[in-house]
């Protein structure tokens, strides 16, 4: 079964450009993972500092491989001081069909 999630966070005021730069670089890397099916980055139209990342992995094993990738830790370390939350808020999704 595919592993699908939504990651959400809010950039601190003035950090939007740096957050966007980090995210776009990270997205290019994640999309190259064998088990990644989607890594789509959005900002909320009514609140451009609110970022939403829609992620889909082939299965649980692919998601676990993503979590263990060597570039995830440095990305999260760089992102942490730039966002309002302590970390990304993750919502795991189940398909209806």
Image (cartoon, rainbow, N blue to C red):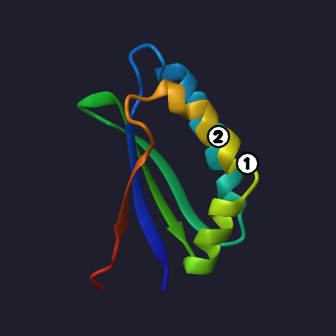
Question: Please, is residue 40 above or below residue 93 in the view?
Answer: above
Task: Let me know if residue 24 appears in the view.
Answer: no
Q: Is residue 96 left or right of residue 35?
A: left
Name the residue furthest left: 46
Name the residue furthest front: 86
- Residue 42: image quadrant is top left
For image coordinates 61% across by 47% down, the residue present is 27
**For residue 22, which numbered disc appears in the image?**
none
**Secondary element at tag 2:** helix
- Dots 2, 1 in contact, CB < 8 A: yes
Question: Please, is residue 92 above or below residue 87 in the view?
Answer: below
**Secondary element at tag 1:** loop
Question: Please, is residue 57 above or below residue 39 in the view?
Answer: below
Q: Residues within 10 Å of mark 1 (few under 14, many from 20)?
A: few
| Residue 40 coordinates in the image, percent (x, y) | 49, 52
For image coordinates 39% across by 39% down, the residue present is 9
Q: What residue did someone put label 2 on? A: 75
Q: What residue did someone put label 1 on? A: 71
| Residue 75 coordinates in the image, percent (x, y) | 64, 40
Question: Please, is residue 63 above or below residue 71 in the view?
Answer: below
């Amino acid at each position: 079964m595919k592993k699908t999630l939504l990651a959400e966070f809010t950039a601190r005021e003035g950090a939007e450009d740096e957050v966007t730069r980090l995210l776009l670089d990270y997205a290019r890397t994640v999309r190259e993972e064998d088990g990644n099916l989607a890594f789509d980055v959005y900002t909320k139209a009514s609140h451009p500092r609110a970022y939403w990342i829609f992620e889909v992995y082939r299965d649980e094993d692919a998601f676990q491989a993503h979590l263990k990738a060597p570039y995830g830790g440095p990305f999260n370390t760089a992102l942490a001081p730039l966002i309002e939350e302590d970390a990304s808020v993750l919502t795991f999704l189940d398909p209806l069909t």
